[in-house]
Amino acid sequence: MKIYRNIGTLVTPVGKSALRGEAMRKNIVSVKNASIVVNDAGIIDDAGSNLKFAVKIDDVVYPNAKGYAEEIDCKGLLALPGFVDSHTHAVFMGERSNEFCMRAEGRSYQEIAAMGGGIRSSVEKVRNATSEEIAQYSQKFVRNALSLGTTTMEVKSGYGLSTESELALLAAAKRVGELTGMEIFRTWLGAHAVPKGKKQSEYVEELINEQLPAIVKEHAAEFADVFCDEGYFTLEETERICIAAQKAGLKIKLHADELADTGGAELAVKLGSYSADHLLKITSDGIAALARSERTIATLLPITALCIRSPYAPARKLIEAGCAVAIATDCNPGSSMSENMQLAISLSVIGMQMSPEEALTAATLNGAAAIDRAATHGSIQQGKFADFVLYDIPSLSYLPYHIGVSDVAAVVKNGNIVSGSL
């Protein structure tokens, strides 16, 4: 058992399911002079102020029924839950900085894809690498994310677009978790684009009849995702792929309404998807559908909006309608080359007019809900994994205010310091 003592202020959303609407701001607890007690399984036994647990100080043991504890002095730092980055493509091969420059010149996401860039550019690099090479290349980005306060991450495939290469990417994602200590949940995104040389109808059949059975047989992913958008997969194709994936035992997440309003948010709710992601072009009908859903999280990706020079997703409308909103980095080599959740929080406050409290909930508890982990992750409370971050900042509001800079002192995963020091 460990006690993390002398926390200046502990700030956390509270709950074991997603917070919706105004609860994203109101269900926040702030405790001064706090402690966090972690058992030997890495689970929080208690958290709050004036906790009385056994501790050895100057060779004198002050016991109680809980037994003995190791004491860690948190030196008056501020504690927040570890970020849950619930939408990433953080395992890949190669970089696409040339596309970044093309967007700066005014070219759109769709124009770059039509010129041979975009997703297909990454596919070529992935297909020419081994799974271990992909893992070795990608681990630095995931290590960076850990040092910046992310303790749990979803990672999608989608740069293979063949059974062999999709499996290689998902194996690489698992390997990156082993190499870095990041807790990674894997999503099969074979339906990210249509590979060069194949008809779309032909590829949909391959996804359902070849890729999906192989993914399930190898236990390579927990979730299935589809890029449901203009120029990618239609509503009908998306529904067919997702129903097949659900029947095979996978949970659903969706890329939806990023490039155009296609009704992707409404389809996500209909399918019981755990999240509908991007939502840059969502309409009032999509917002209303998400507000009615008890499961589907609206996952917003503000770094992507910045990079593709798009208006931000309507976070205020979503929250005011009573939706559960999460934020994530969308870390990927093309449209969001950042693993920094703190930057996503800053952009959420600046560009989407979220309060710091709403942004914190979106980056932690609601992110956990988007990967079906809200009961065990995303907040500092009894019974959850001891994943939290200690910051050398005076308050929660300082986090988005200090733009693009990390004030992380230490990152704690399952009760152990895995980055930084105290």
Image (spheres, grey):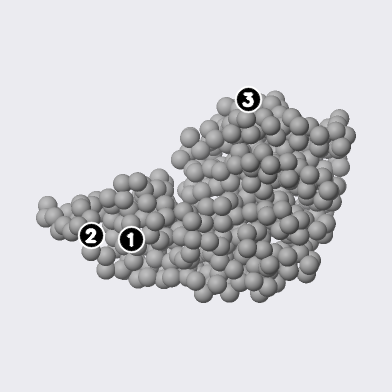
Going by the image, does 200 lie left or right of 414?
right
Discs 3/2, front: 2
Callout 2 touching callout 1 (CB < 8 Å): yes
Q: Identity of the amino acid at label 3?
A: Thr
Query: Image point 65% across, 59% down: which residue?
Result: 296
Of residues 320 and 77, the one nearer the viewer is 320
CA gap, disc 3 and disc 2: 50 Å
Mark 3, residues whose alpha carbon is within 10 Å: few (<14), some, or many (≥20)?
A: some
Discs 1/3, front: 1
**Residue 55 position in % (x across, y down):** 20, 56
Q: Which mark is residue 53?
A: 2
Going by the image, does 102 lie left or right of 392?
right
Identify the element where label 2 is drawn. loop
**Residue 375 position in % (x across, y down):** 48, 56
Mark 2, residues whose alpha carbon is within 10 Å: few (<14), some, or many (≥20)?
A: some
CA gap, disc 1 and disc 3: 44 Å
- Residue 282 seen in this snapshot: yes
Lower position in the chain sequence, tag 3 or tag 2: 2
Q: Which residue is mark 1?
A: 46
Mark 1, residues whose alpha carbon is within 10 Å: few (<14), some, or many (≥20)?
A: some
Q: Identity of the amino acid at label 1?
A: Asp
Query: Image point 46% across, 60% down: which residue?
Result: 379
Identify the element where label 3 is drawn. loop
Q: Which mark is residue 325?
A: none
**Residue 138 position in % (x across, y down):** 58, 36
Q: Which residue is mark 3?
A: 130
